[in-house]
Image (tube, grey):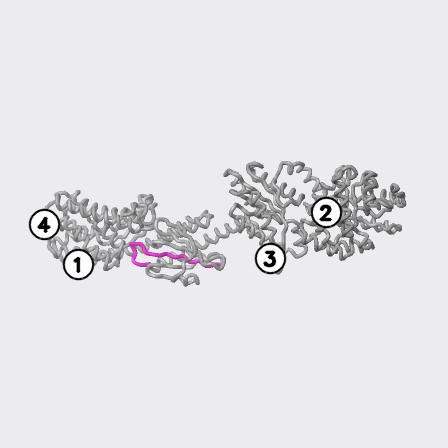
């Protein structure tokens, strides 16, 4: 025999039945051994009693009580007659034969149900016999004491039935049934008058038959009338009970906000009220997949999963047509715009088959269940919408922060990755917001699929995503994230490549508060964007002057919008002749009366999306100034710096063309300076922009040459006209052999590639002399002039246009 924890519900019921039968046999054996001697009985009387027991199973009245039922019959009549007329040792065999025949013939029971109900009859007869003879002792059975003993025996028999039915339900599928026994079943027992009526009828029958046997025929009519009266009473009771059950069913659903909890409650109530062995809810899938099957069976066993393949007799219910079978019912359930199916399977032992009443009740329950489930699903959709990004369906910022706080509270190392797509606005502007949204959806899906195993993947807004990383090398995961995001993304007929900057913060090293960790990851991300290093882990220096940067960003936006930025010009001259060749336009900004260095406010402009209008203002101002110089007879050019972000702007060429046209400037009079790191950060976009500008006729210059990651060999394939040697190589060029060697090599290679070379940062005469000796084409620096405001630059031109530097 397997252990109790391994027995099936059927095995437990059969074990209980065996114990009951064995107990009844032992009691009867003891009664025969130690009780009064067994005396003969008229065989006709025994047969008559057995037949009455069998007929009693034909005329039953059932009062449902949750998962069980009080099945009352006229069996009290043969029971009382047997108690009064035959030896106690014959009571059990007679009742067993008659009840077994009635269960098989009239109630068509088989298997476990038949075994239990047979054992139940044995036990009831045994208890009734013991109670009756304990009370009556040697008294006259037809006297008042005998009547009292009969009443006690029948009530004890009915109480045993209630307790044992409860036990079966508890063993089979509802362990909570014991807790409800005293509060419901016993109360129901003593509210039912049928036991007392049938016992009284049996006593009267016994008294009359004792005198005239044929009077029993009149009492048969009376017994049938009593049965019909109680049958009608039971019907009315069931009707009222159904109304009360529906009310309690609705009350049980009130206040439930979880779909699983509502489903469990619905299925549990269906089993209780329909009195089925199991209940199932079939929910249509949200996609084209198979329907979801939610099933409650056994001892509160709840299963959920895809619907298994096979014959589905309930399919008409899915189309709105209820199905009623002897052992199964299926009704449709409206779930918003979809239709599910509510199924009750397997009759409890007290009913032979489901009826129209059960179908009506299940349909009423399905209506209320559909409303409750639809409301919960709507609430959960609203809750989901409130905590998820509508575009990507990823958790939003609030959801992410809650998950992050939970992760840090749980202990261990927790990594926060904050991603920002570089120049994403260019995608929206060039290809449209539909393409941009599709790109974000695909990147979000890629991140969730690839990195969801580490923790929450969230979209914080715009082009920012965030990840929680646990149980992994956070920096290695960040590098993997960068490579994954930068892989080409198919969007429509295009393959788009996105560049990304990632900031990393770690708990507990960088804090345990979710907001602080996210802010520090954001600082690291912006530092990575400024340094163009892809991935950067937070360091305390990233957090320095954060308040100042926020203030400057606000002030810079105002300055750009109001045109408060100024442009100054630093001359470029020919080191051999001293002739002024042109000037470089440089942006200056005063905030609260104090100058802000360009290397501080230019990255801020890139970060907050101001670099495009700022560049447009500087370009327009510089071309206007150059046009005025050329109008006065000076063939000068002007150079304007381009942010790397501008190279990804598909409207850059048109913007430059319009500005040249607006000021009547030839394209060759404009030089656009780009850092080599800016080109190498996104070579594909950079090359497209450079080709377009070259076709326009604009001169292109590589600024700060020697400080980046390119080489003259690589730059030879780009459409550029000049290189500017960074001032870090010019300083101390005369005394530092290494710097001199680098500068000389650059001059020679540039000459071989037919590129113009400009040396910037010249501050000493010896540096000028060396560059002139090496045939440098142009120089600029404090030795010539500092960056000058427009009017001062014009005056400087007047006084220096024919000036010669130092003689050779």
* Mark earlier in primary sequence (2, 3): 3
What span is colored magenta in the figure? 338-354
SS under mark 2: strand
Q: Quadrant of the C terminus?
A: top right
**Was residue 552 drawn as part of the magenta stretch in this picture?**
no
SS under mark 4: loop
Judging depth in this view, the residue of 454 and 45 nearest the camera is: 454
Left or right: residue 455 compared with residue 265: right
Within-10-Å neighbours for mark 4: few <14, some 14–19, many 20+: few
State the image quarter where residue 59 is shown.
bottom left
Within-10-Å neighbours for mark 3: few <14, some 14–19, many 20+: few
Residue 600 is situated, as x and y percent measured from the top left of the image, at 71, 41
Residue at 57 percent across and 36 percent down: it is 509
User: On screen, 385 above or below 739?
Assistant: below
* Mark earlier in primary sequence (1, 4): 4
Judging depth in this view, the residue of 672 and 548 nearest the camera is: 672
Q: CA distance from mark 2 to mark 1?
A: 118 Å
Residue at 72 percent across and 47 percent down: it is 675
Q: CA distance from mark 3 to mark 1?
A: 92 Å
Q: Tag on residue 197?
A: none
Residue at which label 3 appears: 490
Within-10-Å neighbours for mark 1: few <14, some 14–19, many 20+: few
State the image quarter where residue 213 is shown.
bottom left
Q: CA distance from mark 2 to mark 4?
A: 121 Å
Left or right: residue 117 compared with residue 500: left
SS under mark 1: helix
Q: Using the rendered image of the protein, determine whether residue 452 is visible from the camera's viewpoint.
A: yes
Residue 132 is situated, as x and y percent measured from the top left of the image, at 18, 45
Residue 241 is situated, as x and y percent measured from the top left of the image, at 35, 52
Residue at which label 1 appears: 217
């Amino acid at each position: 025999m397997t252990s109790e924890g391994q027995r099936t519900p059927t095995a437990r019921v059969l074990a209980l039945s065996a114990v009951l039968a064995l107990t009844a046999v032992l009691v009867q054996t003891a009664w025969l051994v130690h009780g009064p001697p067994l005396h003969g009985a008229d065989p006709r009387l025994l047969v008559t009693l057995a037949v009455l027991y069998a007929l009693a199973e034909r005329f039953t009245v059932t009062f449902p009580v949750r998962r069980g039922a009080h099945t009352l019959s006229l069996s009290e009549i043969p029971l009382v007659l047997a108690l009064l007329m035959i030896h106690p040792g014959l009571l059990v065999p007679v009742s067993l034969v008659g009840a077994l025949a009635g269960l098989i013939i009239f109630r068509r029971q088989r298997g476990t149900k038949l075994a239990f109900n047979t054992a139940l009859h044995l036990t009831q007869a045994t208890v009734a016999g013991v109670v009756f003879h304990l009370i009556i002792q040697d008294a006259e059975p037809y006297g008042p004491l005998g009547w009292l003993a009969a009443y006690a025996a029948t009530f004890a028999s009915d109480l045993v039935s209630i307790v044992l039915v409860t036990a079966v339900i508890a063993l089979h599928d509802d362990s909570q049934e014991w807790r409800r026994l005293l509060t419901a079943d016993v109360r129901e027992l003593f509210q039912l008058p049928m036991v007392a009526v049938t016992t009284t009828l049996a006593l009267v029958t016994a008294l009359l038959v004792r005198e005239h046997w044929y009077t029993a025929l009149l009492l048969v009519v009376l017994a049938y009338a009593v049965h019909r009266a109680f049958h009608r009473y039971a019907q009315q009771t069931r009707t009222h009970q159904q109304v009360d059950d529906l009310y309690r069913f609705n009350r049980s659903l009130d206040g439930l906000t979880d779909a699983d909890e509502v489903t469990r409650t619905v299925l549990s109530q269906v089993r209780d009220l329909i009195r089925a062995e199991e209940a199932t809810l079939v929910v249509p899938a949200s996609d084209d997949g198979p329907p979801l099957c939610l099933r409650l069976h056994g001892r509160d066993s709840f299963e959920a999963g895809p619907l298994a393949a096979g014959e589905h007799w309930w399919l008409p219910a899915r189309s709105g047509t209820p199905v009623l079978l002897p052992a199964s019912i299926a009704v449709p359930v409206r779930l918003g715009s979809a239709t599910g199916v509510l199924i009750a399977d397997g009759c409890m032992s007290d009913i032979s088959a489901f009826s129209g009443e059960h179908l009506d009740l299940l349909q009423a329950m399905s209506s209320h269940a559909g409303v409750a489930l639809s409301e919960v699903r709507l609430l959960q959709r609203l809750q989901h919408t409130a905590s998820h990004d509508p575009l990507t369906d990823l958790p939003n910022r609030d959801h992410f922060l809650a998950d992050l706080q939970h992760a840090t509270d749980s202990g261990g190392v927790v990594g926060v990755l904050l991603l920002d797509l570089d120049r994403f606005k260019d995608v929206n502007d060039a290809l449209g917001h539909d393409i941009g949204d599709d790109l974000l959806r695909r990147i979000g899906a890629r991140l969730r699929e690839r990195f969801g195993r580490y923790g929450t993947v969230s979209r914080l807004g715009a082009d920012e995503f965030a990840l929680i990383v646990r149980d992994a090398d956070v920096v290695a995961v960040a590098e993997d994230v960068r490579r994954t995001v930068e892989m080409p993304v198919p969007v429509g007929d295009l393959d788009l490549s996105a560049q990304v900057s990632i900031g990393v913060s770690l708990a507990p090293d960088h804090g345990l508060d979710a907001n602080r960790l996210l802010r520090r990851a954001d600082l690291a991300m912006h530092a990575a964007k400024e340094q163009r290093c892809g991935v950067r882990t937070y360091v305390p220096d990233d957090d320095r002057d954060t308040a100042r940067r926020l203030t400057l960003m606000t002030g810079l936006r105002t300055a750009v919008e109001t045109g408060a930025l100024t442009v100054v010009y630093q001359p470029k001259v020919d080191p051999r002749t001293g002739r002024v060749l042109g000037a470089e336009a440089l942006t200056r900004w005063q905030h609260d009366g104090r100058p802000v260095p360009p290397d501080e406010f230019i990255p801020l402009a890139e970060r907050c999306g101001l670099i495009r209008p700022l560049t447009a203002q500087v370009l327009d101002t510089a071309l206007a100034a150059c046009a005025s110089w050329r109008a006065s007879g000076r063939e000068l050019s002007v150079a304007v710096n381009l942010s790397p972000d501008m190279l990804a702007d598909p409207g850059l060429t048109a913007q430059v063309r319009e500005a040249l046209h607006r000021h009547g400037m030839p394209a060759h009079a404009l030089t656009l300076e780009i850092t080599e790191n800016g080109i190498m950060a996104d070579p594909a976009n950079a090359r497209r922009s450079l080709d377009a500008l070259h076709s326009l006729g604009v001169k292109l210059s590589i600024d700060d040459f020697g400080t980046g990651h390119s080489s003259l060999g690589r730059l030879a394939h780009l459409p550029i006209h000049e290189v500017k040697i960074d001032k870090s190589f010019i300083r101390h060029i005369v005394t530092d052999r290494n710097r001199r060697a680098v500068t000389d090599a650059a001059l020679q290679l540039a000459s071989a590639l037919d590129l113009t070379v400009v040396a910037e940062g010249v501050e000493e005469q010896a540096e000028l002399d060396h560059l002139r000796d090496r045939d440098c084409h142009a120089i600029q620096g404090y030795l010539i002039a500092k960056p000058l405001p427009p009017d001062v630059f014009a005056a400087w031109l007047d006084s220096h246009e024919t000036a010669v530097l130092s003689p050779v």
